[in-house]
Image (tube, rainbow, N blue to C red):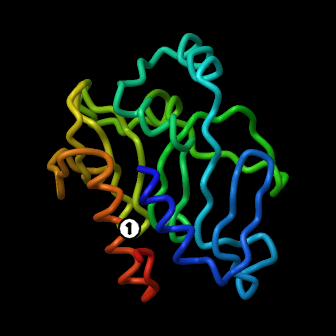
Amino acid sequence: MQSILDSVIHSNARKPNHAGFGWTGIGAMPEVGRAAFRHVVFAPLPEDEVERRQRRSPTTIPPHALAYLASFNGAHFYQGGLSVFGLRGEVSRDPDHRQPFDLIDQNGLDRPANSNPEDFYIGALDEDGSVVYFRGWAGRVYRRLETSTEPLEQWENFESMLECVLNRLANEFNVPWHN
């Protein structure tokens, strides 16, 4: 996981980065706006904070999601081309207090109506509005349209999904992310 994040950071080394309150903006995009970044990665939460939020949630977070939360608490890659959900602590419009899309909301109130009860949503792709999820407690990751139940893609694990989707988005944006 860390090697993928390091590659994203390294590929944007020539563009200024910014560390905000609990997040890092990678690859400044001043042509879009003074607070715009190609990628925003949220800092991992302390383990006791993750446990506290999980106790308050009606949703049980599977071990595979807890594993990526130990590395980062959600992210927006390629300006939201891929959003990985995290645990939100507060809601604020202050650009210095950015937060990820919330795992708990995405698996509760904002859960797609046609969901399999075993699906746990961990992200979304902006290109077609598809959602990314674990099925049950297995580590396999799937992508499907929000309006369908048929998987469009599947990967062995979270890391292989992240690498595959980041490669595809890098090609679309015509910018490398790999060394």
Q: Position of residue 137 (x, y in %)?
A: 24, 25
Q: What residue is shown at x 69% (from left), y 57% (from top)?
A: 24
Q: Position of residue 148 (x, y in %)?
A: 22, 49
Instruction: Describe the element under mark 1 as helix, strand or loop.
Output: helix
For residue 27, above or below residue 164:
below
Work out whether residue 13 or residue 65 is closer to the camera in this orientation and state it. Answer: 13
Q: Position of residue 168 (x, y in %)?
A: 32, 74
Is residue 137 toward the left or the right of residue 34 in the image? left
Which quadrant does the C terminus fall into?
bottom left
Q: Position of residue 170 (x, y in %)?
A: 40, 78
Q: Amino acid at mark 1?
A: Leu
Q: What residue is shown at x 23% (from left), y 35% (from top)?
A: 139
Q: Residues within 10 Å of mark 1 (few under 14, many from 20)?
A: many
Give the total of numbered labels.
1
Q: What residue is shown at x 44% (from left), y 29% (from top)?
A: 66
For residue 93, above or below residue 51:
below
Is residue 84 toward the left or the right of residue 21 in the image? left
Q: What residue is shown at x 33% (from left), y 65% (from top)?
A: 165
Hey, which quadrant is residue 140 in on the image?
top left
Work out whether residue 174 or residue 8 is closer to the camera in this orientation and state it. Answer: 8
Label 1 belongs to which residue? 166
Is residue 159 toward the left or the right of residue 27 in the image? left
